[in-house]
Image (cartoon, coloured by chain):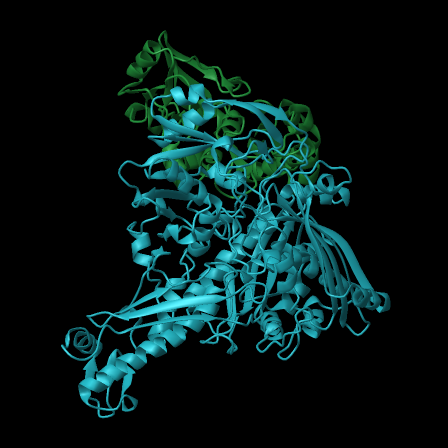
Chain colours: A cyan, B green
Amino acid sequence: MGIGQSVRRLDAVAKVTGRARYTEDMGMPGMRHAVFVRSPHAHARVRGICLEKALALSGVEAVFTFADVPCIPFATAGHPYSLNPAGADVADRLLLTDYARYQGDEVAIVVARDPFTARKAAALAEVDWEVLPPVANLEAALAPGAPAIHPGGNLLREHRAGKETDAAAALQAAAVRARGSFRTPVQQHCHLEPFSAYAYMEEHNRITIVSSTQIPHICRRIAAQALGLDWSLVRVIKPCVGGGFGAKQDVVLEPMAAFLTWKLGGAPVSISLTREECMACTRTRHAFHMEGEVGADAGGGLTAVSLDLTSNTGAYASHGHSIVSAGINKLSSLYPHAAFTARARTAYTNTPTAGAMRGYGAPQVAYILECLVEDAARRLGMDGVEFRLRNVARPGDQNPLSGKRMVTAEAAACLEQGRRRFDWERRKAACLRTGDVRRGVGVAAFSYGSSTYPVGVEPAGARMILNQDGRVTLMAGATEIGQGADTVLAQMAAFTLGVDVAAIQVISIQDTDVTPFDPGAYASRQTYVNANAVHPCALKLRRKILEHAALMLEASADTLEMRAGRVSRGDGTGLSLREVALDACYHKERGGQITAEVSRKTTANAPTFGCTFVHVEVDIPLCRLRVLDMLNLHDSGVIINPQLARGQVQGGASMALGFALYEELLVDEATGQVRNDNLLDYKLPTILDLPDIEAVFLEPVEPSSAYGNKALGEPPVVSPAPALRNALLDATGLAVNELPLSPKTLYRHFAAAGLL
Amino acid sequence: MFDIQQYHKARSVEEAVRLLAAHEDALCIAGGTDVLVRLREPHSGGRCLVDIHDVEELRPIVVLDDGTLRLGAGATFTDAADSPSVLRHAPLLAEAAASVAGPQIRNMGTIGGNLCNGAVSADMAAPVLACDAVLRILGPEGHRAVPALGFHNGPGRVALRRDEILLSVDVPADRYRGFGGRYVKYSMREAMDIATIGCACMARVEEGRVAAVRLAFSVAAPVPVRCPAAEAAVEGMSAAPERRPALLRAVSEAVPADVKPRASWRAGADFRMHIIRTLAGRVLNEALDRAGEVS
């Protein structure tokens, strides 16, 4: 019962009927509203600030500037606390600044009785700017003598993964080599619910923050750090969240909301960003500049992969170098027999801050890797599927960077099934590759992780309570932000307890005062690591239920079973859970409330695999690429809920189609000004732009998670972009090594190639 | 929240004109899909709205006794896209209306608002020019009728006084009978977008030859434009299938003289020109095919 079934999401009815409450739905009497005063310049210093007009506006209660905030630098990335100071995130910002590092940087904040007055007043703050020349692209930031955006210089971090000498030797010996330069754009998360948080005080020394966050427990710690408070003096409540995709794996508004209520005697203060602010002034996906070379032997063996990756983290570190570093680690499982090396650098620029975004570096690294692999296959005269089949990881292979053995690894099965189901050979043979309208097919593969271990710690917590009516309350550290965590955890609990899923009541609103500890929703980790807490917790609760039932039945607990929501003896007689619960609570001598709690660290990180097949049509005169068909195959271990899993693939692949074909936050490289901080000019694809997206799951049983499952949240965004580039190459013979493959990009390449 | 200081609801076109005349800073609002977006930004001064959204006489789409196709300025995009009269006589107007944004916007936004807003990217602008339509206007001095050509008289500007309102877009019968029409919106995505280039064409074929062509573009110059050079280049040419490539080449080669695309971060001038030339051929081709079906 429960595992492998398309159980309807627990919050489906509440969401479609509008009952679900999000942060902005939870207002309080007396709420104040705050709006930031932002820098119009990408690089500038404040000479002075005059607040007279802003303060004179009726309804304005206070304005705070950089001069009013604590001088405590803090880091915003949603990573667990690091016991090793060298592993800590870079603490490079204050609550407000007098030195603007990007267009939108926050120099002051207005608090008013309504949001409109606050916005009006923010526009009335008069700032005297000393405008400085911006460093708005990677080349400028890393050029010798470039102005330093932060005291340590513009190179945030640099490292090398794998042995450079081994890869160089393998490249030297290779029969064919493919090399190229690649670029990926700045992508925006475009979560439906904008950033929103409010804070208030009910006690003299404790602050409560309600926030649309993916990381309540981390948020508590960072907000407390930013204000110099003991961590438990801050409490974070997470209501329904309308998506985050990594943007809300960062602490963006909460420390400021906490600061404002602290300054205003505990009055509730809300900060809700506009869409424009969300797009340009929160977090984005890192743009990458990449060089690379791969080598293969004459027999079709991939022998060497050498990458040189530079990522643009924008004005502040946020997740910074973790992105490129994780991207390398996640892809390193795919071709374990090649000598693998990568140099990675991350630089500051005067552009919007990049942070975590679904895929966390992997879409960028997969783009260069899977384009170069395709190019090498073509040099060898080999079919792209065949070449990958010769080289992908198999069970028992070792990851070249970590040395860890892979237990489940169905990359080859994904490619083989995909080739068959997509009718690859026939489609490939049938493509018309001449004339104005051409067709082509493309494939790309990926590997990904299931958690952050061993880079990060992977705790998960679960608490279960047998209620008096026999239903079971489940509190989990896993943070539901729309992905379906509550539902799949309920399925797991129901399966192990032997009760119906409907009998499990998940507490979706999280509160760091009471919710079990877990760092939050990121790294596709929740189903994987929370399974390892929910499973033992359910076993514990079940044991306690059976033990109490044994007292009631004067039997041995070992002779009892829990099935279909009942405790039964072998002869079919037994007790309902309600009877057990009532007795446990109200019998005057025996029992007590039946609860169980487990906190468990997962010390594994099973790689996931998969691939994307696409069939495209390219209208050359109109500079348009249309996706005719797309098939995604995933080895994510056992699928807990097929309908939710398909939803993850469709959503993830849609996001990848946006990354590959449409989306780009345009930053003027000379001025650092953001051109398109709105959903009209930023071309998020609509439903009419997307093909039907099919998903197929291979389901090996992964032993490192309790129900055999691996990650699925992010893997679908990794392989579509290179598959589309490879299909464009197949159709036109042109290798377009930049994204998005939009009409404007295609026009440049088609014109240069003389196709127009 | 919107910075609205005064709101007046008009129940007739005459009342709307009176209200506009009486309030100097008044702004006319119909569907609100452009006006409200602008009002979202805080303004220092007050804002006064005259709402013509529920003026029923502006809404109908009809064919008059003399065959004139009349689209009320208050007809929504959805009204125009679904109208049997429009689909029958000037399907390019329906195609343009259906290409606007998404269903919610199409249910609110109006044909008249689309034109009077003055945007060079307005989806109705090019097809209205290709139809050689007549615009009926009411002001304090009474009615007047002007050709659609010339109504857009500068970037973001139209030849409409502040106290006038557009009543209808009229297409006389001789301007659509026997014509095939087509509108193609070239944009970066299939919905919720503004045109990178909009191309509209009406064409008529007589005895196998191109008897009349009206070709128009949006976003191809500071205002929506007709294309006299391209039209002249193909009039009289054979429309026969085997001669089509030459015809389409001719229109594509002539059209640059009629347009002046602008370079911006949204799209380069060379890219826009390439798309203009490509669309001129493709849209004319489809209009001629439809003209063949008509005659």
* Residue drawn at (63%, 80%) of the image: A396
- The picture places residue A665, in percent across and down from the top left corner, at 58, 41
Image side of residue A622 versus residue A480, left or right: right
* Residue drawn at (45%, 27%) of the image: A122
Q: Quadrant of the C terminus of chain A?
A: top right
- The picture places residue A342, in percent across and down from the top left corner, at 72, 60
- The picture places residue A39, in percent across and down from the top left corner, at 55, 30
Image side of residue A323 versus residue A10, left or right: right
Up the image or down, A713 lies above or below A29; here it is: below
Q: Quarter-wise, where is residue A555 in the image?
A: bottom left
Q: Quadrant of the N terminus of chain A?
A: bottom left
Give the residue furthest to the right.
Answer: A172
* Residue drawn at (58%, 78%) of the image: A407
Up the image or down, A216 lies above or below B90; here it is: below
Task: Decide which of A202, A627 is in the foreground and name it.
Answer: A202
Give the residue furthest to the left.
Answer: A588
Number of on-image labels: 0
